Amino acid sequence: NAGLNENAAVAVAANITRAEQDGCKSHGLFRLPGYCASLRSGKVNGAAVPEVRSIAPACVLVDAGGGLSTPAVLSGHGMLVEKARANGIAALLVTRAHHFAALWPDVEPLAAEHGLVAMAFLNSKAFVAHAPGGRKPVYGTNPMAFACPRRSPDGGLSERPFVFDQASATMARGDMMIAARDGHAIPAGCALDEHGEPTTDAAAGLRGAQLPFAGHKGTAIALMVEILAASLTGDAFAHEALASAAPGDKGPTQHGEVILAIDPERCSAGGGRAAFLSRVEDLLGFVEAEATEAEEAGHSMRLPSQRRFAARQRTAEEEGVVEVPEALLQECSALAASD
């Protein structure tokens, strides 16, 4: 376990497994070497036990103690749910954590298991230039995730809520890293090289700066995430994290994360959760009908996360078997043998 305590190791293993099951290769086994390197170097505190505190009637604070964010977030979920139930809305602040994982696992269970609407915001060290006009990294890739419960056919909560997880950058950094590893070009408009010039070379983009999606609109989202994830938690802004990183360190620095949870049973105009879920199905059902019509006309249209849920279903049908690149499999096997 590379020095990671048992509870945290179980949480991280489950997170990696779910990413692989869902076809989210950029946050599955691909991340394992980075986890191990950061733990073995002492950069990440593998012995850390998250400290969970109530700091206000509707606010939970989790100090990750320099450990990984996945166990820290999970440790705060219980109190977050309790406070959302009591107040209608609640917030979870996570400080001093290292985040290697996708962001959707931090919110999807809140919707699927507890019927809450949840949003998460996370910053990182600077990888993304300001747009328009910027030529060097200023912001993190700064993802945000959203999860909304859906009603199952039997009237309960669906195991497949409406979920999205997107970076403020045009392309997730993990996807760019995989493109560089495999020698694939990246789409135009995703990155600048180290000289501030546009590039489709993934490796050059990693050395330079990524670009926010939709120009100034993505920049505004990246700034919002910086304010929420760093200012509320007191953790480093992206440019501060980049300045403090050791030369050559490609892993995540300590960061802050904010999760908001809304209970539609308490926080709605009337009718509680049942009425809310009915309205959600009215909307998503309409979009799904449009998608069916588009597909019949030969066009591809789907809701966010439908591809991921389809991959999860295929994995289940294939008894949990997933494809892993040979080189990555050998690297992971070597890590296991050396532990």
Image (tube, rainbow, N blue to C red):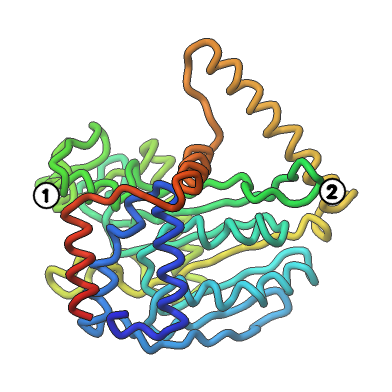
- Between 272 and 39, the one lying in front of the other is 39
Between circles 2 and 1, the one closer to the viewer is 2
Q: Residue at x 74, y 37 (%)?
A: 281
Residue 268 relative to residue 202: left or right: right
> In percent of the image, x 44 and y 64: which residue is there?
15
Is residue 198 something that shows in the picture? no
Left or right, residue 215 beside residue 199: right
Locate the C terminus and report the quarter of the image it occupies: bottom left
Residue 194's disc is: 1
Which amino acid type is shown beneath numbered disc 2? Ala
Viewer-side residue, 240 vs 261: 261
Task: Provide residue 143's location: percent of width, then percent of height.
Answer: 43, 54
Q: Is residue 281 left or right of residue 308?
A: right
Residue 115 drawn at (x, y percent) = 72, 57
Residue 319 at x, y percent in the picture: 46, 51
Q: Residue at x 22, y 58 (%)?
A: 329
Q: Earlier in the sequence, mark 2 or mark 1?
A: 1
Q: Residue under label 2, please give it.
A: 274
Q: Quadrant of residue 255?
A: bottom left
* Real-space CA distance between mark 2 and mark 1, rounded to the nearest whole angstrom: 53 Å
Relative to 268, residue 114 above or below: below
Q: Position of residue 158 (x, y in %)?
A: 69, 48
